[in-house]
């Protein structure tokens, strides 16, 4: 009887411990942003790969940029997600558009990512915003992205 009670307690603890994972499974997300712990929406995800086959995932460009600047750790490669079709590609080839709408209500980040410059400019014409270039470009300028070139991923 005593062992049965212990087994029930252990089972209850295991169920309680698994609740967050179950909630993520129900919501369709199993990963959390390395910067702020927010659930990562794969449509806006940013991925930074480091030595030792470590990959950090971020909820958006702003969080990834903040984390990388604060950590000072160069990634081997940084990839972003195209907001048009959701494909993943090298950040050095991305066009970043800062939007002016109240982004918090609909998307996790005020910076949209486009693989196509034409689509980025069309988005700005239709919805407003600005193309982030030069020192305002997130995830490093082209010369800062030496870790992307080092990976041979050109
Ligand atoms: Zn985040």
Image (cartoon, grey):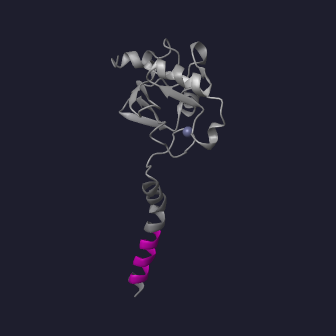
With respect to residue 71, does 140 lie above or below? Answer: above
Quadrant in the picture for residue 75: top left
Magenta: predominant secondary structure element? helix
How many numbered markers are drawn? 0
Please determine whether, in this image, residue 90 is positioned above or below residue 107: above
Q: Residue at left 58%, top 35%?
A: 109
**Residue 150 placement (x, y as % from top left):** 38, 16
Q: Position of residue 108 (x, y in %)?
A: 57, 39
* Coordinates of residue 67 in the picture (x, y in percent): 56, 31
Residue at (47, 69) in percent of width and height: 13
| One can see residue 152 in this view | yes
128 left or right of 18 in image: right
The residue most toward the front is 126
User: Which residue: 51% across, 22% down?
Assistant: 120
In the image shown, does 71 or 134 lie closer to the viewer? Answer: 134
Question: In the rendered view of the protein, which quadrant contains the N terminus?
Answer: bottom left
Q: Is residue 51 left or right of residue 106?
A: left
Which residue is at 65% across, 33% downward? 101
Q: Which residues are magenta?
A: 4-13
**Picture quadrant where residue 106 is located:** top right
Instruction: Check residue 90 for magenta coloring.
Output: no
Residue closer to the observer: 75 or 60: 60
Q: Quadrant of ligand 1?
A: top right
């Amino acid at each position: 009887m005593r062992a049965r009670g212990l087994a029930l307690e252990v089972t209850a603890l295991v169920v309680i411990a698994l609740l967050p994972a179950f909630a993520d499974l129900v919501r369709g997300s199993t990963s959390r942003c390395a910067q702020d712990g927010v659930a990562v929406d794969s449509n806006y995800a940013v991925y930074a790969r480091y030595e030792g086959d470590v990959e950090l995932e971020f909820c958006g460009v702003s969080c990834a940029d903040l984390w990388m600047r604060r950590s000072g750790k160069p990634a081997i490669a940084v990839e972003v997600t195209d907001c048009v079709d959701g494909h993943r590609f090298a950040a050095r080839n991305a066009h970043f558009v800062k939007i002016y709408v109240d982004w918090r209500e609909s998307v996790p980040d005020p910076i949209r990512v486009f693989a196509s410059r034409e689509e980025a400019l069309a988005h700005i014409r239709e919805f407003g915003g600005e193309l982030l270039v030069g020192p305002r470009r997130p995830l490093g300028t082209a010369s800062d992205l030496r870790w992307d070139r080092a990976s041979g991923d050109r």
